[in-house]
Image (cartoon, rainbow, N blue to C red):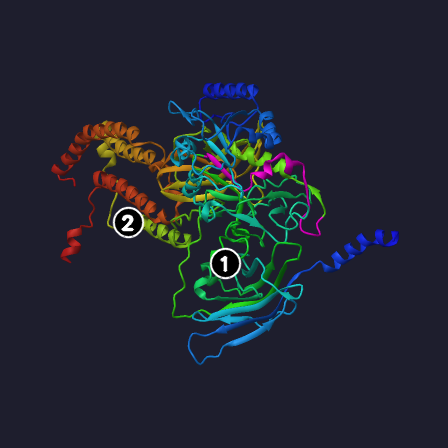
Amino acid sequence: MRFTQSFAPALLLLAGVAQATSWGFDDGSVSVVAKRAGDAGSKERFTSKTLVTKPVSLGSTDTLKVSLTAKDNGKGKRPHQAFVILKEKETGLEAPFPLTVKESGKAVVSITHKDLPVQFLISDEPLEASIILGSFGSSEALNAPVFDVKLQKDPNVPLPSYEKPVRYGKKEDVHHIFRADPTSPPKVISIFFALAVLATVPVLLISWILLGANLNHLSKAIGAAPVSHATFFGSILAMEGVFFLYYTSWNLFQALPVISAVAVVTVLSGTKALGEVQSRRLAGER
Amino acid sequence: MLRSTSPLLSLFAFLLCWGAALVSAVSITGNRLLAIFDEVGEKENYTKFLGDLESRGFQITYETPKSESLALFHLGERAYDHVIFFPTKTKGLGPNLTPQILVNFLNAKGNILQTLSSTTTTPNSLVSLLAELDITLPAERTGLVVDHFSYDALSAPETHDVLALPPPAPVRNDISPLFSTGAPKDALLAFPHGVGAVLGPREHLTPILRAPKTAYSYNPKEQAEVLDATDLFAAGQQLSLATAFQAINSARLVLLGSAEMLQDKWFLAEVAAGPNGKPVKTFNREFAKRVSAWAFQELGVLRVNWIEHHLNEVSAVNKSNPHIYRVKNDVTYTISLSEYAYNKWSSFSLPANDVLQLEFSMLSPFHRLPLSLDKAHSTPEASAYTVSFKLPDQHGIFNFKVNYKRPFFTNIEEKNTVSVRHMAHDEWPRSFVISGAWPWIAGIGATISGWVVFVALWMYSAPTDKKMGNKKTN
């Protein structure tokens, strides 16, 4: 008696462990029913242990039918939760499709493209379908992957437009694309043409000399009007010097007063100097 | 280094903050907390949670929705800084807590912590407020989240309505793990008799705690026996059990699906995840502390200390924050940030995988560049982030813009406007360094020398015997 008394709870416990019931299903099948009559469609069977090996392909007008008989410890029973979960493998997004369950445990659900979230339709990855059966009480719930679904998209039907919702987070870096720097032709060409331009100066001088250019009247001119000639020619050189300084370092407001000063000198000395040149011409010396 | 505000003003502000910090180490927006119960006596269930709040410096006022004296605003100013709603049985919340007033409260930078329970229907006023924020509650204003896999096997082996969940990892890998850092590895949260909500696609909403993949929500009154396939509200991770909302003005609202998880009972309880789980003490107390601290602006509050930008060129005048730059100038920008945690400001470090970005924009950004930590200008209280870059070759009015809006952090939007001028005429390279200009320079040289020689010859050349006319006649 004592023996049984002490053993009874243990036996009960053992029985409880053995009876730790769990949810399962029989007659699991998935079929694709085409809208057009005559197309028989395909039907594949699965259990909670054996998956359907080939992905089920679902066209845009087809209906995917999943049916099974839910069983609690082998007996047909209605669970509170009976879902087919479709999962997009890349993003992990899941969509539940509750099965319509009868008292006997017979459950069925049909899924078409219209029932799927937009994110599934625009993705190219196959969807992973799993069955969840569970209810209140101590029976262990079941979560079993059963088959894959490949969505066949109709090329004539445009995909639904989907804009990713705004989320606070880092954005793409932006780097300004600078305009290309101005370019110069090859230096050889520039140097060649610069030399060609400079070569015109000796050509000009030599041709003037060949035509008889000389400075024979220089002593006469200096003798006649030394100051004005020196100043006039000097002022012309000075004007070029001012231009050179303006090019290298001066700004316009530094250059202008000097230019006007030199110009006054040029005009004043120029009248004298050019008058002397005129006198030579009137004397018939030119 | 020049500060963006005047030194005297910032010193004054610093003293003011420091003084305030001495008085009470608490939320930076204030410590007046209003707790709304159905009956004030219910607060006995929450002594530990409320005691934790009081010990952090909050002054709690207890009210019921029926109270005549209850008013969130006094003479147009907020009368409270934060509000907690515990579940109330009444259908509405009366004229003092209309959705309109609650939205005004958020607009006035007040914070709200709202708790739900599957045992009481949610008041209309709060449902409307949540609808404004794009948060949807189950139909009939009641729902119960159950999970037949990760329920607490100790307290709900039959009903499965107490969820045992690991502390929530952030939903994205670039979000600060505010609510899970430092939790023991096998820690579990008890989520008893809770309501799940569905969130709209809004950037202001972030789930703090999401339901496990196998959980679902049903109406215990109508769907206790059969859950009709067409009446499923939501399931899996689409159900948000704790939700954070932060408005553009950084006012916060937290929706906590289970008020019971804040009760003393669940602070002390042990839970086991599923029938085979090992009993562990709940993580609820620490989670409640963090959720309330986040809602009441004690966590995840950012502050901009100063902003500085200057020319980063050799031989340049290194003036801080000039109003004008030139195109293609090299410029350095530095921003100093601090983060508040419970009672002190400390240096702000970015969450892993997140970056602080600077935009240099005129209408649209020309540059958007990541800033990096500048150790030389950082202190334990503030961290400086810096970036050096070349201004675009486009003149106009530009902004240095730091737009750091992230889940769980107060919004930072800083704009500093500068002009970018084009090149002055004397800033271009001189013509003699441009090889393409050499023939033209040579041309000027040839003209000048030719002119000078011509002048000399014209004035001083004597006629020769060789007559030009002779040649012509010949």
B258 with respect to B73 (left or right): right
Q: Which mark is residue B389?
A: none
User: In this picture, is A187 found above or below A51?
Assistant: above
Q: Where is residue B226 in the image (x, y as percent from the top left)?
A: 53, 57
Question: Disc 1 and disc 2: Cα gap in Å?
Answer: 108 Å
Q: Quadrant of residue B182?
A: top right
Q: Which residue is disc 2 drawn over? A: A204
From the viewer's side, name the closer residue of B225 and B182.
B225
B310 with respect to B346 (left or right): left
Under mark 1, the amino acid is: Asp
Under mark 2, the amino acid is: Leu
Q: Does the magenta stretch include residue B462?
A: no
Q: Quadrant of residue A219?
A: top left
Q: Which residue is disc 1 drawn over? A: B228
* Comparing labels 1 and 2, the label whose residue is closer to the camera: 1
Q: Tags 1 and 2 in contact by the CB under 8 Å rule?
A: no
Neighbor class of circle 2 (other Cα within 10 Å; few <14, some 14-19, many 20+) is: some
Q: Residue at x 51, y 37 (%)?
A: B87
Residue stretch in magenta: B250-277
